[in-house]
Image (cartoon, rainbow, N blue to C red):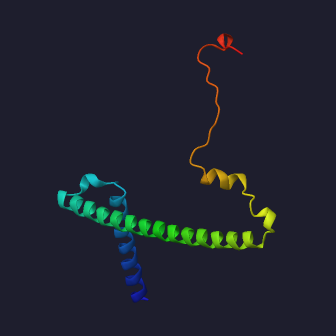
Amino acid sequence: MLQLERGSASMAKQIELLDASQRKLLGHGLSSCTSEELQETESLLVRSLSLIRGKKAQLWTNEIKHLKEKERLLLEENARLIEKLPAQEKGFVPYRSQIGQASDIDVETQLFIGLPEMRCS
C-alpha cells in the first residue's frame, strides 16, 4: 500500500513537471524564468522545429515520389489503351491533351474601359 502511495506521488510530481514544461514551451509563465532557462527553452524549440521541418520535408519527398510513380503507371496504361484503339481512332486526341501539348493558344478577349454606357457595340 505504501509503495502505491509513493508511486502515485511520484507520478503526480512527474505530471506537474511535464505540465510546467508544456506551459513554458507554449510561452506561458515565462516571467519567473531565468535567462538560462529561457535560452534552454529556445534551444529546445529550435531543435524541435528542425526535427518537424525534416519530417515534413521527408513526407513531401515521399508524396512526390508516390505521385511520380502513379503518373508513370497512368501513362503506361494510357499507352496500352491507345494501342487497343482501332486505327481510325488513334489520330483523335482529346481536347485536354491538346491544351497540355500546345505552347501557344490564341484566345480572343474584349476589354472595355470606361463607364458601361460609353461602350461601343
> Closest to the observer: 59 or 87?
87
Q: Position of residue 7 (x, y in %)?
A: 39, 83
Give the side of residue 72 with respect to residue 22, left or right: right
Give the side of residue 33 with respect to residue 70, left or right: left
Q: Please tell me in which quadrant of the rendered image residue 44 appears.
A: bottom left
> Closest to the observer: 1 or 75?
75
> Closest to the observer: 112 or 52?
112
Q: Position of residue 27 (x, y in %)?
A: 34, 54
Image quadrant where one finds the N terminus:
bottom left
Q: Position of residue 33 (x, y in %)?
A: 23, 57
Q: How many marks?
A: 0
Image quadrant where one finds the C terminus:
top right
Q: Position of residue 39 (x, y in %)?
A: 21, 60
Q: Residue at x 35, y 63 (%)?
A: 49
Q: Residue at x 30, y 66 (%)?
A: 47
Q: Residue at x 19, y 58 (%)?
A: 34
